[in-house]
Amino acid sequence: MPSPVRLAEIVSALGGELCAGSGADMAQVEARVIHRLAPLESADSGSLSFLSNPRYSAQLAASAAACVIVAPAQREAALGRGAALVTDNPYLYFARLTQWWAARNRRPAVLGVHPSAVVEPGARIHASASVGALAYIGAGAQIGPGVVIGSHGHVGADATIGEHSRLAARVTLGEACRLGARAVLHSGVVIGADGFGFAAELLADGPQWVKIEQLGAVRIADDVEIGANTCIDRGALDDTLIDQGVKLDNLIQVGHNVHIGAHSAMAGCVGIAGSARIGRYCTAGGGAIILGHLQLVDHVHITAATVITRSILKPGQYSGLFPFDDNASWEKNAATLRQLHALRDRLRALEKK
Amino acid sequence: MPSPVRLAEIVSALGGELCAGSGADMAQVEARVIHRLAPLESADSGSLSFLSNPRYSAQLAASAAACVIVAPAQREAALGRGAALVTDNPYLYFARLTQWWAARNRRPAVLGVHPSAVVEPGARIHASASVGALAYIGAGAQIGPGVVIGSHGHVGADATIGEHSRLAARVTLGEACRLGARAVLHSGVVIGADGFGFAAELLADGPQWVKIEQLGAVRIADDVEIGANTCIDRGALDDTLIDQGVKLDNLIQVGHNVHIGAHSAMAGCVGIAGSARIGRYCTAGGGAIILGHLQLVDHVHITAATVITRSILKPGQYSGLFPFDDNASWEKNAATLRQLHALRDRLRALEKK
Amino acid sequence: MPSPVRLAEIVSALGGELCAGSGADMAQVEARVIHRLAPLESADSGSLSFLSNPRYSAQLAASAAACVIVAPAQREAALGRGAALVTDNPYLYFARLTQWWAARNRRPAVLGVHPSAVVEPGARIHASASVGALAYIGAGAQIGPGVVIGSHGHVGADATIGEHSRLAARVTLGEACRLGARAVLHSGVVIGADGFGFAAELLADGPQWVKIEQLGAVRIADDVEIGANTCIDRGALDDTLIDQGVKLDNLIQVGHNVHIGAHSAMAGCVGIAGSARIGRYCTAGGGAIILGHLQLVDHVHITAATVITRSILKPGQYSGLFPFDDNASWEKNAATLRQLHALRDRLRALEKK
């Protein structure tokens, strides 16, 4: 259970302007004890909540929260209800608050190497790092200060991990792969499996696949987060590169020799084929697919479930998903879609008359 | 190898009406020894088979099975071939038969904690539970009667598991997550990784992502099955909820704060974005995607590979996939699709003439 | 770091015709020391590179590589630049070269069973096999000559692994599943989780799902490669079958009782539903979905993100993805698509006039 904290302590740590609300006593508001952070609708008198989107102002009025974080534009509305914490960007404030809250309440990692872990000779583990139960650290691996390796973690030979990175239980970091500082890797992540590379040997019946050993590695810059069961393959000859601040959700596939530029973010189930080059500040919605050997410039945004089949050289939002419908309507339209080119020709013929 | 069993024993355990078939002796039929359960086409004289779909009646006539489970409507056809076991719902009977068969033949779990497992102080493990080799059980975790934790399992601190749940090898149940009774979790499942939540901090070049620590957990009701490498993220503030009897296939992504209603089922590779609320008795075909913050009422059925982009408030079947074609035909129609709106305008212009 | 090697040694091992280039001394060329294999554009004087596609001839001229592998048609162009290694199929040569290179440089597996591994009584492990740290080998499992099981590997009871197969860290091979010779399985692979099989029991409110225990296994022939976090489910009654030389990329779902024919290859994020029968020499691009109980003959090629909804009985390329566009154009076309059938009727009406 999180340890409760007075409102004044939060404001002292994170800033913002605490306002008592009409008729309330500031000293009493400052002394309010916060037991949890909560959405407006489920907040109670021990909760600190936030309003990031003015659309939800109705929920603000009805909320039982001890205090609500709001933008200056919502100050009056908030104070009509009760105490408020006014700040320019409530959602950003809330994000930092969750970090502060988690740091206070997180079960501290036990420093050092758990006796059940296996560490090969030649691995270098900083004294302030934590290696969990039943983890494996390969020869020549280097693990920086404050790093946490969860239970069943696997750090391959000669891999390196920058300071204060946190690997949840059961993360695999392959041989010679390099992970920057402050990374967050979730369970089931696989960094550095072989890229999918084969040469076709044409035999009488058809092609047989001859493996191209993948001799590159994966290099991941600082402040990257990677979701559960996401895979980033090692490069064929050169390395696969994930730049600073990239955020990847769960179950994403990143092929060999992909580059993802700084501060790009991808939602769950995205697939990025080999050698795609993705710019900075890009985003992709869930289930989007980016084919191989393409280039996306900075600030390209891909809608969920869209398939990118050629390079995009102009920033913007790109989409390509079939709009869903009730099944009967879809069936009729989908059937007609298979005659669309013919319909165009018929239309053209009519126009010529 | 499964241990063989006489037909009479099966009928005694599971019910149904055993019929000898024309000219056969009932005592001899009851004494037939069943070595395996088999589909009609590969069944032999030691096999028990079933016919659940009248479409396959031709296979019934040709089957060499010792006995076939059929519905009353197929009784005559079945008896013309040989012995039959008549029951109202042959497929349901067959399902129960596989359970009975597996329970008889399954390698029994070894009670207690394997000496290679790591159990933190304060974990409570029922005496009738089994904790496999090299598993990890966190502090404060509670493991109920008859639970089986496979090898390399990870049960986080303060997580709870209800009675008779079975976790295959290498399942991760995160800190403070709660799993009901009789769950079946397959290898690679990750329950309770962080949801994908970031606040954008707008800097000169573009947004940088500030992590929102995920302070909720995952709560899973009774009788839930979750397929291999499927991920269910913990909630941001409140919990992610999976209700009773839900069945999830492999490689599914369930985002933070999703609710899935009782008895809903999702096929492989489905993605459900954060805060989606899915009703009871819903289904989704393989690769379907449900975007975030949507609501689906009870009894909504999503066709495979369909992307749900808005709430669905009426039960029914919904579809939205591009019909495939030979590549040349598809190319012509897809190219024309990019001019569809212009074609509509041209049609309208013609109509006005 | 890879150990350097003289060019002459490579030619002696792998064949091909070494040509010194205009004005160069063959003895000096043969003595050139190769430190790495590299793409044309990043090659330096210690690199061996290759040109497999004549489209990249411009890069050939500019490359600083010590030597370039080329086809006979590029001999003259290559020799104008410098040393060349001429061979009929440069990409295939390159593939074999990477294998030779990796075999020379790979950290040798430590023979025998790591002391931290758990091996159940009755498992048979060949003396030339290697079982990694913290691995688990079930009762009755059989592990052939030269096999490598990575750390945290799980080999279920009665499973078998053919000679020289390599399982990366954290691979799960389920009970009674059979893996052929020379397999390569990457981290997170799950072979033999339960197929997704339930019988519906119709209750008042809707169907509840009654589990069909999956009594089959998975059989995988020789020379198969399976990518990270890919899942292959066990059969319901009979086995799921993966034939010789099949290559599967990461995060692929293969349902129960699927058959994949020899030398077929599937890119990342593909989903194959239960009981699909896929021929030999087939391919599927990333994110393609093949529905259940379908048949694909030999030499069928599926474009990325295409959904196969009926059997394909004729070899060829099949496609069905929505072409992406800038968001505004897509929105207009997608909205019109929902009226396509009506547009066809309006066109027909005009034609009748």
Image (spheres, coloured by chain):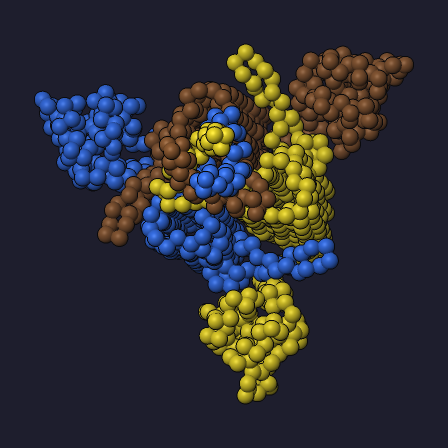
Chain colours: A brown, B yellow, C blue
Using residue B275 as the reference point, say whether residue C84 is left or right of it: left
Q: Is residue B102 left or right of residue A6?
A: left
Q: Percent from the top left, x then y, of residue A7? A: 80, 19
Image quarter of residue B275: top right
Residue located at (77% from left, 14% from top) = A75
**What is the number of callouts on the image?**
0
Frontmost residue, B250 versus B83: B83
Where residue A156 sits in the image (x, y, percent)? 46, 35
Of C105 and C176, nearer the camera is C176
* Position above or below: C156 against B309: below
Q: Where residue C149 sits in the image (x, y, percent)?
A: 44, 48
Task: Decide if residue B172 is in sight here.
Answer: yes
At a point 57% along the width and 57% down the height, the residue shown is C197
Identify the residue shown where x is 56% and y is 19%: B208
Image quadrant where residue B337 sits? top left
Q: In the rendered image, is residue C161 in sight?
A: no
Q: Residue at x 55, y 77 (%)?
A: B78
In this orientation, which residue lies closer to the viewer: C186 or C126?
C186
